[in-house]
Image (cartoon, rainbow, N blue to C red):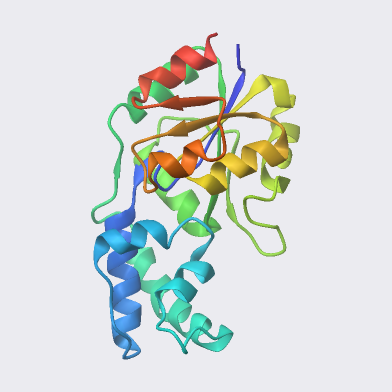
Amino acid sequence: MKHLVIFDLDGTLLNTIADLAQSTNYALKELGYPTHEEDAYRFMVGNGINKLFERALPEGEKTEANVLRVRQKFVPYYDLHNADKSLPYPGIPELLTDLQTQGIQLAVASNKYQAAAEKLIAHYFPSIHFVAVFGQREGIPTKPAPVVVREILKIADMTSTDTLYVGDSGVDMQTAINAGVTSCGVTWGFRPRTELEAFHPDYMVERAKDIEHIVNK
């Protein structure tokens, strides 16, 4: 049985791709750059917003200065529009409620910048207590570095064997491997199943409620 479940946010708890795409396209357009179809962003997200902007910029324009210019346009817009179209995936609210009722500790480890991660969790899951909600923070290595997972383990006073890490991408599976915790890939997120399978996760699930079965094994 697991006593702590750490969730990725984008592509795992929430389908945020429409708002991420809309906000990035807004920033690109404001700066005179071409925009992208929404579905293309599924392969740009996952490593923090600076990497998202680098991937979204045209070839020859992927400079640090341009990434910062896009960020300056993106953040104020996304802060206002990050809940326009985003929604929890089917079964996620019920899963979180059931796990909480059982006394399972819950946490979030995301590469989304911290303020947005906190806002979205508070907005969509107001009745759920998370022992930690960590996004991208200054001076803290992003996933797949294991730092954030180890920080959560310390806060929750749990060991790696007590812990299940749930995510939708190769970055998430590598994070779990690096942190030495049990990994669970979800097939409803932004990345294809083959990307998850390449990391040989301990579990793969197609429905949110299947995570509860893993926790209670």
113 relative to 10, above or below:
below
161 relative to 85, above or below:
above
Q: Residue at x 63, y 37 (%)?
A: 176
214 relative to 108, above or below:
above
Measured from the top left, where is residue 194 in percent x and y? 43, 41
Front in this rendered view, residue 150 or 125: 150
Rendered image quadrant of residue 75: bottom left
153 lies left or right of 164: right
Front in this rendered view, residue 195 or 16: 195
Q: Quadrant of the N terminus?
A: top right
Q: Residue at x 56, y 18 (%)?
A: 104
Measured from the top left, where is residue 121 in percent x and y? 43, 43
> Is residue 158 in sight in this rendering?
no
Q: Residue at x 72, y 47 (%)?
A: 147
> Is residue 193 in sight in this rendering?
yes
39 lies left or right of 132: left
Q: Pick out the residue farthest to the top.
A: 217
Rendered image quadrant of residue 39: bottom left
Measured from the top left, where is residue 150 in percent x and y? 73, 39
Measured from the top left, where is residue 84 in percent x and y? 24, 56
Q: Quadrant of the C terminus?
A: top right
Rendered image quadrant of residue 79: bottom left
Front in this rendered view, residue 45 or 132: 45
93 lies left or right of 64: left
187 relative to 32, above or below:
above
Q: Residue at x 49, y 66 (%)?
A: 49
